């Protein structure tokens, strides 16, 4: 059976679109909840470890895919949190 590679960038882009559907914007309670989201400490440490290995040019293919996933999800989270802050700044 053929395996399908997980492409985190594509998945993150599709999730981003869920939050950008016109007319469905973020509610204040959802915005407040989004601002509380973050990686668990172990995952943040793992992403940091992978970044260090990447800087040394020592990542395996699997580690590169893992780092790419952390980066895509981190970017998506930053995007959502930016949108959430905008919602909460509105009167």
Image: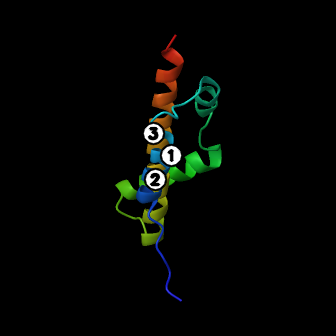
Badges 1 and 2: C-beta atoms under 8 Å apart? Answer: yes
What SS does tag 2 mark?
Answer: helix
Residue drawn at (48%, 67%) of the image: 6
Q: x and y percent of residue 66 in the render?
A: 49, 61
Mark 1 and mark 2: span between their CA atoms? Answer: 7 Å
Q: Which residue is mark 2?
A: 14
Mark 3 = which residue? 20
Query: Is 28 situated above or below 23?
Result: above
Instruction: Give 26 or 74, whichever is nearer the viewer.
Output: 26
Residues at circles 1 and 3 in contact by the CB criterion of under 8 Å: yes
Residue at image position (46%, 45%) is 16
* Closer to the camera in the image, 34 or 48: 34
Instruction: Check residue 18 in the rendering and tell me which mark sits there, or answer none.
Output: 1
Q: Position of residue 29 (x, y in %)?
A: 65, 26
15 lies left or right of 42: left
Residue situated in front as seen by the camera: 59 or 12 = 12
Classify 10 Å Cα crowding around label 1: few (below 14), some (14-19), many (20 and above). few
């Amino acid at each position: 059976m053929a395996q399908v590679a997980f492409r985190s960038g594509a998945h993150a882009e599709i999730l981003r679109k869920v939050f950008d559907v016109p007319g469905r914007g973020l509610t204040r309670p959802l915005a407040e909840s989004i601002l509380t989201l973050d990686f668990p400490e172990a995952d943040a440490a793992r992403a940091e470890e992978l970044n260090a290995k990447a800087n040394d040019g020592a990542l395996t293919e699997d580690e590169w895919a893992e780092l790419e996933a952390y980066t895509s999800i981190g970017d998506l989270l930053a995007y959502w949190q930016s949108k959430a802050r905008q919602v909460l700044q509105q009167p």
